[in-house]
Image (cartoon, rainbow, N blue to C red):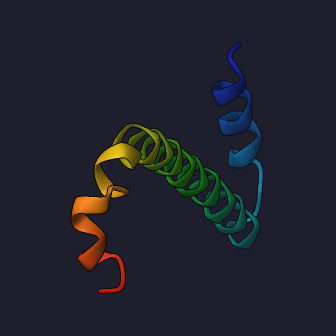
Amino acid sequence: MTVAEQVFEQAKLLPQPLAQEALDFVLFLRARQEREEWRDLSNAQSVSLAAIWDNEEDEIWDNV
């Protein structure tokens, strides 16, 4: 039995308010994972674009 199946089986035994709390927690974990993925992507882009963003020719835009 997978972990997801075990979670499902245990969640079925919970009273409604606790099941809702468990669902809220699962949704929180998914949202946190998505934010981490976006942060990783943003960091990767920042590194690769640093030379383009930080150059003397475009200094005038630094304080905008």
List the single residue furthest toward the bottom: 64
Q: Residue at x 65, y 37 (%)?
A: 8
- Quadrant in the picture for the N terminus: top right
Q: Is residue 51 above or below residue 24?
A: above
Q: Residue at x 74, y 28 (%)?
A: 6
Q: Residue at x 30, y 71 (%)?
A: 59
Q: Residue at x 43, y 49 (%)?
A: 42
Q: Is residue 63 above or below residue 54?
A: below
Place of residue 30 in the rendered image (x, y in percent of width and height, measured from the top left): 55, 49
Q: Is residue 46 left or right of residue 30?
A: left
Q: Is residue 59 above or below residue 57?
A: below
Q: Which residue occupies the foreground of this view, 40 or 56? A: 56
Q: Is residue 38 left or right of residue 33?
A: left
- Quadrant in the picture for the C terminus: bottom left
Place of residue 3 in the rendered image (x, y in percent of width and height, measured from the top left): 72, 24
Q: Is residue 63 above or below residue 6?
A: below
Q: Which residue occupies the foreground of this view, 17 or 42? A: 42
Place of residue 26 in the rendered image (x, y in percent of width and height, measured from the top left): 63, 52
Q: Which residue occupies the foreground of this view, 24 or 10? A: 24
Quadrant of residue 27 in the image?
bottom right
Q: Is residue 18 left or right of residue 54?
A: right
Q: Which residue occupies the foreground of this view, 64 or 42? A: 64
Quadrant of residue 7 in the image?
top right
